[in-house]
Image (cartoon, grey):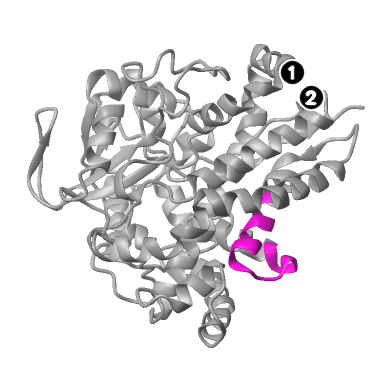
Amino acid sequence: MTQVYLGSSDEERKSLIRRSRSGDMTVSNKEVAKAFAIDPNYDPYEISLDEMDPSHPSLFLNGTSWPHFERLRNEDPVHYHEESMFGPYWSITKYQDIMYVDTHHDLFSSSQTKGGIALGGVPNREDEYSLPMFIQEDPPKHDDQRRVVTPLFMPKSLAELEPLIRERAGNILDNLPRNEEFNWVRHVSVELTAQMLATLFDVPQEDRLKLIEWSDTIQNLADPEQFETPDEGFKVLMECLTYFQGYYEARKKEPPKFDLISMLAHDPSTNNMSPQELLGNIMLLIVGGNDTTRNSITGGVLALNEHPDQYEKLLQNPAVIKTMVPEIVRWQTPVAHMARTANQDTEIHGKQIKAGDRVCMWYISGNRDEDAIADPNEFRIDRQNPRQHTAFGYGIHRCVGNRLAEMQLNVMWEEIMKRFPKVEVTGEPLGLASSFIHGIRELPVTIRD
């Protein structure tokens, strides 16, 4: 069996790629989905390496991306993909190579003007669809803008937030139904992260689910089930811009406060942002605050149910939560990849990467690299050195909120263990059709008395 597209001809697919790469946001999502439709269950060991492309969203939706990365790690860890729905790119699949790219921002740019941090990014985009944000900047602008929000994620600030997180986690868990199936994602994972986001931005809690809607919109821009075209999704994001622009301008006139909008409004590096840059940085903070925690909370419940011996280990010794949390983050890897653009000709593993080439660091693959992590395909909640993983990235772009994410996960599991003998998965999980965010949209569970 070979990887065969089930839809249109090669020329039609190339035409769609050209239109997308030119920044055309009116390309029909259904047309793209049809043209690039594949059987996600094909055997990646039965195709040639030239055909290997692990970026297809269907592979992540169906959980069939893993053998692609296994084969690339073993046979071609720095692999060039001539044609994909995101254009040509290099796959970097080994732990040490990922670390090398991530820590050499002089060689590999994150700049939006060169394509940004995700596959499919359009270089030199300066229109209403551009979303400049500090994670898609290089020094010095990246450093100046990141510094603005960093104080909110320092240990002292996190210690002050912990009692509030614990209270909220307890309230969420105490109000869950018993002896009936419900969606853990919506009732628990989304609720905790939404409440925290509203607190970090200092906006009304009754607006918290708007933040989740806008975060989901970013992930679903190309989803034909959600939007006919990406342009339709951007209309929803304009609602986000209108909402936050009001707070941004108002807080410029108020005394500085310790919330994200006030910080952005008062610092010289961020107090005069264009509407697109304001929206970009707001979306970065929303998505960053939502997806890691939300999908790790859900992924942990799923992993423990799939590995009952580990769940039993947790039940016998709840103190293992401290090492379990980073293991959950590694296992789930909520951000599947980050992309860069080569600033100059360079070489990795003897492969010649040219200036301007797109380079994709597959964090999700680095976290299963046998040469860096012992028995990486085993979920082990008492793992030694559990923070040795790629999920938060490395270097200047390392996730600014990683400690907050871990703290929320620690608190949530401590509160779960006080209340329930077990959270039982009683239905099939529904994943996210995305090769960027490794997400879970639905997880049916039951808590029994």
Q: Is residue 377 positioned above or below 165 on the image?
A: above
Give the percent coordinates (x, y) of residue 148.
Answer: 41, 66
**In magenta segment, residue 202:** yes
Q: Nearer the viewer, residue 29 or 296?
A: 296
Q: Amino acid at mark 1?
A: Leu
Side of 111 where 410 appears, left or right: right
Asked if the residue at tag 2 contacts the one at tag 1, i.e. Cβ–Cβ closer than 8 Å, the answer is: yes
Q: Is residue 39 positioned above or below 193 on the image?
A: above
Q: Tell me how far mark 1 sits from mark 2, CA to CA.
A: 8 Å
Residue at screen point 61% across, 48% down: 159
**In magenta segment, residue 313:** no
Picture quarter with the N terminus? top left
Label 1 or label 2, whichever comes before in sequence order: 1
Side of 164 where 370 appears, left or right: left
- For the question of whether residue 98 can be seen, the reply is yes
Q: Is residue 128 positioned above or below 225 on the image?
A: below
Q: Nearer the viewer, residue 145 or 190?
A: 145
Q: Is residue 186 positioned above or below 259 on the image?
A: above
Picture quarter with the C terminus? top right
Crowding around mark 2 (Cα neighbors within 10 Å: few <14, some 14 to 19, many 20+) is some
Side of 299 where 65 appears, left or right: left
Residue at screen point 53% across, 72% down: 261
Give the percent coordinates (x, y) of residue 122.
Answer: 29, 61
Which residue carries the number 2 mark? 422
Give the secondary structure at mark 2: loop
Give the percent coordinates (x, y) of residue 114.
Answer: 22, 60
Disc ID at residue 315? 1
Crowding around mark 1 (Cα neighbors within 10 Å: few <14, some 14 to 19, many 20+) is some
**What is the magenta range?**
192-208
